[in-house]
Amino acid sequence: MSALGELGSLRGKKPAGQLPDRGGGAGKVYKKDNLAAYLFLAPWLLGLFLITIGPMLASLYLSFTDYNLIQAPQWIGLENFTRMLSDERLHNSLRVTFTYVFVSVPLQLAVALLLAVVLDRGVRGMAFYRSVFYLPSLLGSSVAIAILWRQVFGTEGLLNQVLALVGIDGKGWISDPSTALGTLVVLNVWTFGSPMVIFLAGLRQIPTMYYEAAAVDGAGVLGRFFRITLPLLTPIIFFNLVLQIIHAFQSFTQAFVVSGGTGGPSDSTMFFTLYLYDRGFGNFDMGYASAMAWFLLVIIGAFTAANFFASKYWVFYDD
Amino acid sequence: MRPHIPPTARPRLRALAAVAVASTLLAVSACGGDSGGNSGGSADGKITLRFTWWGGDTRTKMTQQAIEAYQKDHPNVTIKGEFGEWSGYWDKLATTVAANDAPDIIQMDEKYLREYADRGALLDLKKAEGLDTGKFEEDTLKAGEFDGGLYGLNAGINSFAIVANPAIFKAAGVAMPDDTTWTWDDYTRIAAELSTKLAGKGWGTGAPGTNEAALNLWARQHGESLWTQDGKLGVSAGQVTAFYQQVLKLRDAKAIPSAEFVSQDMNAALDQSAMATGKLAMSWMWSNQLNAMSKAAGKELKLLRVPSVEGKADANGSYYKGSMFWSISSRSKHEKEAAEFVNFLANNTTAGNILLAERGVPPNTEIRSAITPKLQPADAASAKFIQDIGKELGDPSPAPPVGGGQVEKIIQRYTTEVLFGRQTPDKAAQGFIDEVNGELK
């Protein structure tokens, strides 16, 4: 820990004033620093109130109204929420979203961890590989990639052409309701770069002395991975898990573009967010869509809370 | 947001995670608003009108030319075009109207006309100064009329039809059908024969049921109608079932491509559709698209009447549809100028000569005869088709009620279910009816 401790104290000595309350200076300086801090925060605060909190409160109000975008909203109480109970397409969209989250996130994290461990072994040209693997994360939720996905998995797409070379008859992966969601899962797994980079950073923090000691005691590669790497990496895994679950629940662009905005074929890629959009902008039912947004907030909040609660039992903080 | 973890952050990770989570959560339910420029006037009498339409490249170029011609004669008016693809068009229009920022002149579709008009977003064109409908063919105004007002001015006439690629018929050695006498069985048989002869290189026909128009024709052939005059769903579960049984007949005879192929083609852009890429010998299409489709296919295509139950063309349910409408926002600050511009689009020979029949055959009979000699072969053919079927038409088809705009997506979904064998025709029919009824307000 000594190396880490040193690093920590070095950072603490930096006169950057990033933590003014710890500076222990006179009250005046403290207040001055505060003002400066708020000034620097101002752009972000303005954004927070004008384009985040404001619209959020508006959508909370709208969720209790019947609002068709053109006429003034009318208060209808909880009707939007009770309607959700009997909306079968909404139930289907929940099924689709949950399937997507629970299949794609573990797969994505597994791939990210695997590659991080391999790269951490000191592969030559690691910086290059790291950038290459990170690239899909930057591109993954872009419209261009989603369009590319259509081309790759289409009836005459790249995948089928490759399959044809080895004599397999492909199919329209995106246009078949039984495989369409699978292509989106693959797309999400493909963007493993951002959790991978975080894993890499985490792996770097594990003191080598543990490995040295384990090696002396005769632990194999797997033993070291499962008994040292994995336990010490649990905070990072937890962090990635929470972020990626939230991220997956909010996925929209991929499904929207790949399905041509329909959530099709047969609602098989109708994410909750896509259905929300469809209700709001396709069907002029903005009250209902707002209620759905708040429902999604509750779902994500519940999952995140559950995640934090469960973390007590499996996340190991090596402090 | 790309969280970067400092090397010593282990103790602080929990806090960091919490912050990251909180800020990500905040983004969930916030919807961005769209604030745009306002169309306003200025002291020197110059005004700006905003004009929005959907369509491809050809339409955009023609429309821009018409705008330029108008501006030349009206130096005090500037018209700003806003255009896009069909799919994104309605989302954008809904947002701008909601934000009280609607364009002054709106290219409107039948499916959404009532949606907007019933909510008071459109101007009653009967009350608009400077708009003359005297030269319009009778009946063509009706589709944009309800509750005593005129909310959309017919911008062109079209009709749902079958488009055929004679080159593929020839290559397959199949004779073109006589479309005045063909039945659904003939259609199925001919399409199946084409598929067989093309041996995997193409198929006989695209599937009906990728939009609601074919179902409407089917219903009209059987004494029903998709919508009723009083704004309700007019087709029975029995007829939707029969329609889907017909779709299955086509599938089982291999007259249409595989379910996956149909599902993929359903929302393809026109120039990437299977008809344009020469994979289909026949397909279902609006007649005014003949020109664009012929250009995309690089072949001279031909319009055919839709098949009927007993082989009688005058009982095939066809009707003239307003391919699209001109509407004016009820919140326009320049109602008079907007109406004058719409008048120019509809009644001026200069505009007619530029726009030709790209939006369908002009409903103004004078303009129609003025432009007929100037039409490109494909436009001339679709204009002739519209004229030819004129004597066979049944009653006009009632416009979709509020909420009816959703029917296209709904029928696409149930057609997919049926084609993949995930739902039987009767189950899909009931689902379709329940869902459409649920959307009507």
Image (spheres, helix red, strand yellow):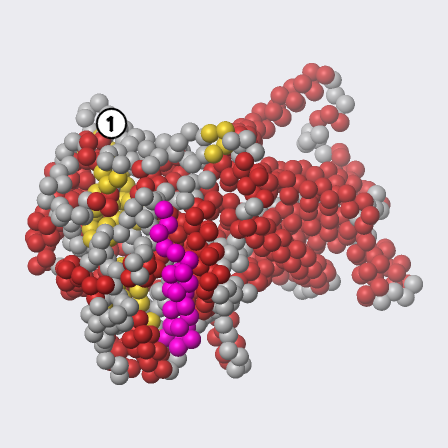
Does residue A99 appear to the left or right of B39 in the view shown?
Answer: right
Residue B252 shown in magenta = yes
Provide the major secondary structure of the magenta segment. helix
Q: Residue under label 1, please give it.
A: B41
Give the residue displayed 40% in from the left and 38% down from the top: B95
Residue A179 position within the rendered picture, expressed as x and y whole percent measured from the top left: 55, 65
Residue that sits furthest to the right in the current view: A217
Quarter the N terminus of chain B occupies: top right
Q: Can you say whether B34 is above or below B401 in the image?
A: above
Q: Give the range drawn in magenta.
A: B232-256
Residue A176 position within the rendered picture, expressed as x and y whole percent measured from the top left: 50, 66
Does residue B207 appear to the left or right of B71 in the view shown?
Answer: right
Mark 1 residue element: loop
Chain holding disc 1: B
Quarter the C terminus of chain B occupies: top left
Give the residue type that dot 1 points to. Answer: Gly
